Image: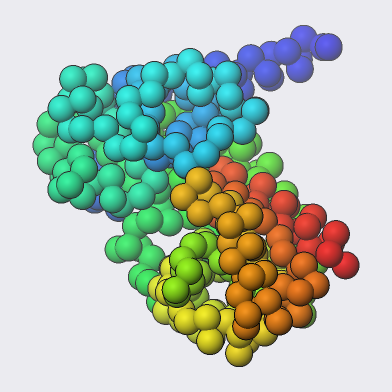
Amino acid sequence: MTSRILAAMFVLAAPAAFAQEAEVETCHGPQTFDEPPLRAITLNQQATEVMLALGLEDSLIGTAYMDDEIPEVWRAAYESVPVLADKYPAREIVLAEEPDFLFAGFGSAFNEDNLGAAGDWQDLGIGTYLADASCSARHPEDEALGIEPVFTDIAMIGDIFGIEGRASAVADELRARFEAVEGAAPGKGKTAFLFDSGDTAPYTAGCCGAPAVLMQQVGLESITSDVEGQWAEVSWETVAAADPDVIVLIEADWSTADAKRSYMENDPVLSQLPAVSEGRFVTVPFSQTVLGMQFVDGVENLAAQLDALK
């Protein structure tokens, strides 16, 4: 390996010099960081994975609220960071850690029932960031998200922590992977029903959230693309009438793919749908349906399964 390559690798891996303060416009308003946060806490899995993907585990003093397993590529880095709580940690626990930055994946982190308003933390001198896809002020319920929120988060965290070059390299790699799958579009010409949870009335993708984007990325047409919201509850009559070509099952601890498939296969009406009787099911873990670092894995995973169905 040449000295030039070694030098380039060292520059990429080493902490960047914070040449000037970072002024960023977040969902919680404008914030200024005089120096990179040194005591950050992440409050949802997708927030944790953004930090790990950018090599910022040494800046983390705690994580919380995992949905499922951290991918192997980030496992060792994740295990070096204390877990503060299975779900959201109590406000008092967070305060005791003396953080200087809180990064959440979902707006619920800053509800009064959980950590409280982001502005209250900022008043204490603690920076906050909410994943772009979860910012309702930037993304109304009736406007499609697209994949750009993933790149917004990477760029914003890169700015806040002074690692713009590293963030740009990660973003470039992700964008290339998205483009490769989108060009293939293995689901083109097929309709799909995404089944998240629910028996009496299924919980599914609305017009404009991350699950809808997931299906669009592989060319699938969601049967609920005209239903407002990021998520939606519909009737089984709606599903039966649409007669989807493919059924996308979300794998989650609270609602397994096997349980959902069994429900449809044992229902006297749903079992007659060709997609059910012919076994045209594909499965995606919940963490791969969130607009975070694993979302591209979800797109690739879904694309591969659709190819296998052919």
- Report whether residue 214 is seen: no
Query: Residue placed at 71% from the left, 60% from the top?
Result: 282
The picture quadrant where one finds residue 18 is top left
Where residue 234 appears, x then y in whole percent? 46, 79
Colouring used for the render? rainbow
Identify whether 289 is placed above or below 137. Answer: above
| Residue 227 or residue 283, whichever sits in front | 283
Where residue 162 appears, x then y in whole percent? 43, 29
Toward the right, the furthest residue is 310
Query: Residue placed at 38% from the left, 23% from the top?
Result: 83
The picture quadrant where one finds residue 139 is bottom left
Quarter occupied by the N terminus: top right
121 relative position to 254: left or right: left
| Residue 158 or residue 229, whichever sits in front | 229
Identify whether 197 is placed above or below 275. Answer: above
Quarter occupied by the C terminus: bottom right
- Report whether residue 73 is seen: yes
Where residue 194 appears, x then y in whole percent? 59, 68
Query: Residue placed at 39% from the left, 37% from the top?
Result: 65
| Residue 276 or residue 248, whichever sits in front | 276
Query: Residue placed at 58% from the left, 19% from the top?
Result: 76
61 relative position to 91: left or right: right
255 relative position to 65: left or right: right
Where residue 91 appears, x then y in whole percent? 18, 33
116 relative position to 277: left or right: left
Identify whether 105 is placed above or below 270. Answer: above
